[in-house]
Image (spheres, grey):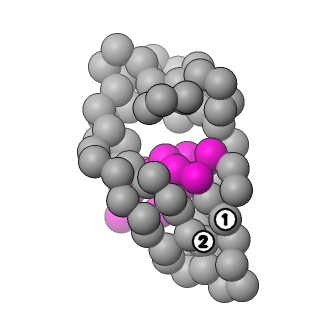
Amino acid sequence: MSLQIVILPRGWVMVGDCTECTDKLVMKNASVIRRWGATGGLPQLANEGPQSGTKLDGKCEMEFPISSVIAQLKCNGKVWKGY
C-alpha cells in the first residue's frame, strides 16, 4: 500500500492509500482533491503535501478498474502524514 494521487476520468482527482488487486485499484482513506491550492500543480502536492489553499473532501474506501486510471503520482508520505 502506498499513498498516491490518482487521476481518473471526468476530472476526478483522488488521494489515498492504494493497493492494486488483480484488475482494480483499491484506495483506503481516499479523499477527492476538490481544490489543488498549489502553484506547481499535482507534482507539488505529491512532493510537498497539502497547501494552504488545498481542499480535500471526507475520507472513504473506494475501488475502481485499473483501466480507468489516467495517471498515478506517488506521494511523499512524511508531508502527507495526518492529512
Circle on res. 68: none
Image coords of residue 15 (percent x, y): 49, 47
Q: Tag 1, which secondary structure?
A: strand
| Residue depicted at 34% across the width and 26% down the height | 54
Q: Tag 2, which secondary structure?
A: strand
Q: Which residue is mark 2?
A: 25
Is disc 1 in contact with disc 2, using a CB cutoff of under 8 Å? Answer: yes
Image coords of residue 76 (percent x, y): 67, 30
Between 41 and 47, the residue placed more toward the observer is: 47
- Quarter of the image where the N terminus is located: bottom right
- Residue 4 in magenta stretch: yes
Rendering quarter of residue 39: top left
| Residue depicted at 31% across the width and 19% down the height | 53
| Magenta stretch, overall SS | strand
Residue 29 visible here? yes
Which region is colored magenta? 3-17
- Quarter of the image where the C terminus is located: top left
- Residue 79 in magenta stretch: no
Residue 67 visible here? no
Task: State the CA–CA distance, disc 1 to disc 2.
Answer: 6 Å
Q: Amino acid at mark 2?
A: Leu
Image coords of residue 17 (percent x, y): 58, 52
Circle on res. 19: 1
Give the left or right position of residue 16, taking residue 78 as reference: left
| Residue depicted at 36% across the width and 59% down the height | 60
Give the left or right position of residue 58, taking residue 62 as reference: left
Neighbor class of circle 1 (other Cα within 10 Å; few <14, some 14-19, many 20+) is some
Q: Amino acid at mark 1?
A: Thr
In the image, is residue 74 above or below residue 62? above
Between 42 and 55, the residue placed more toward the observer is: 55
